[in-house]
Amino acid sequence: MKLNLQFIILCATLALAPRASAHEFWIEPTEFQVQKDKPVVADLKNGQLFKGTRQSFFADRNTYFNAMIGDRTIAVTGRMGDRPAIQLDAPDMDGLMIIAHEAAPSSLSYNEWAKFMKFVAHKDFKQAVTIHEARGWPKEGFRETYTRHSKSLVAVGSGEGSDRALGLATEFVALDNPYSPELNGTLDLALFYQGAPRADAQIEIYERDSEKTVEVTIQRTDAQGRATITVKPGFDYMVDAVVLRPTSEGPIPEGDPVWETLWASLTFSVPAP
């Protein structure tokens, strides 16, 4: 029996997806500004430097997947393998749309201690090596579980409205509307973890121009979990932050993941003049 080509591609996608791990994950709309009578289309992407591969829709990989506009909540659904993963009917109302996605847990293995050390240095987890060694965990072949917590802001029509906390395990909240004509070159953000402000956390800001050139800067949140970033008209932005924590405060069965990472991202654009 000959296998259908689409089925072969689908199986290959399923086999490869768990390895798309230690990179950023974000929601990327086809257009960050749409008219209210037009559909909203966006990709889930995984990659580096605000450049990545498009991920397909699989219902069992999502623990939360909704879009909010005004007081309306729209479930993001689809057929297995849909790409773009987000295909919403025209909302027929003006406002700031918040698209939010939480991914089901996945895992990876560290076969080289140097790779883990490079990761924790890049993400500024100063105590990770000390904790790992103090608990006597192996330095090769140990596992990490990870989850993704992504949001994107899309202006529908006027784009008026505000971002808000949605109760994700970790999330960014834009305290300014990036589509507001009153935006004056900076945008305030808040970072949350388990519903509380996350103070003194490293955040990475990815700024992409119309030629797809990307610049990366790093900041830290203040004592209230807030940061002010510089933004420019005509540029797209992604902000990213990672939580690293042991999977348990007690003994961990041999072979189980010892670390857990929770990745937060937020994407938006600032309209050109």
Image (cartoon, rainbow, N blue to C red):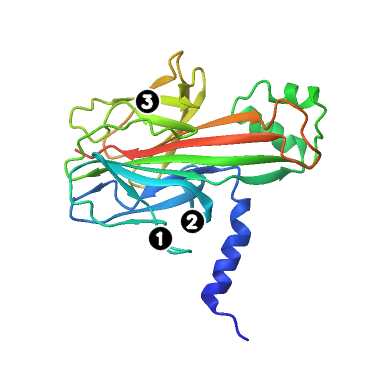
Measuring from the top left, give residue 201's x and y in whole percent.
52, 22
Q: Residue at x 63, y 61 (%)?
A: 15
Total marks in image? 3
Q: Determine the secondary structure under disc 1.
A: loop
Viewer-closest of 272 and 94: 94
Say which label, 3 or 2, has the lower sequence index: 2
How far is the residue under mark 1 from the one under mark 3?
31 Å
Q: Is residue 207 visible?
A: no
Q: Nearer the viewer, mark 1 or mark 3?
A: 1
Say which label, 1 or 3, has the lower sequence index: 1
User: Which residue corresponds to mark 1?
Assistant: 78
User: Which residue corresponds to mark 2?
Assistant: 59
Viewer-closest of 110 and 254: 254
Amino acid bearing label 2: Ala
Viewer-closest of 156 and 73: 73
Amino acid bearing label 1: Gly
How far is the residue under mark 2 from the one under mark 1?
8 Å
Measuring from the top left, give residue 36's x and y in whole percent.
18, 50
Q: Determine the secondary structure under disc 3.
A: strand
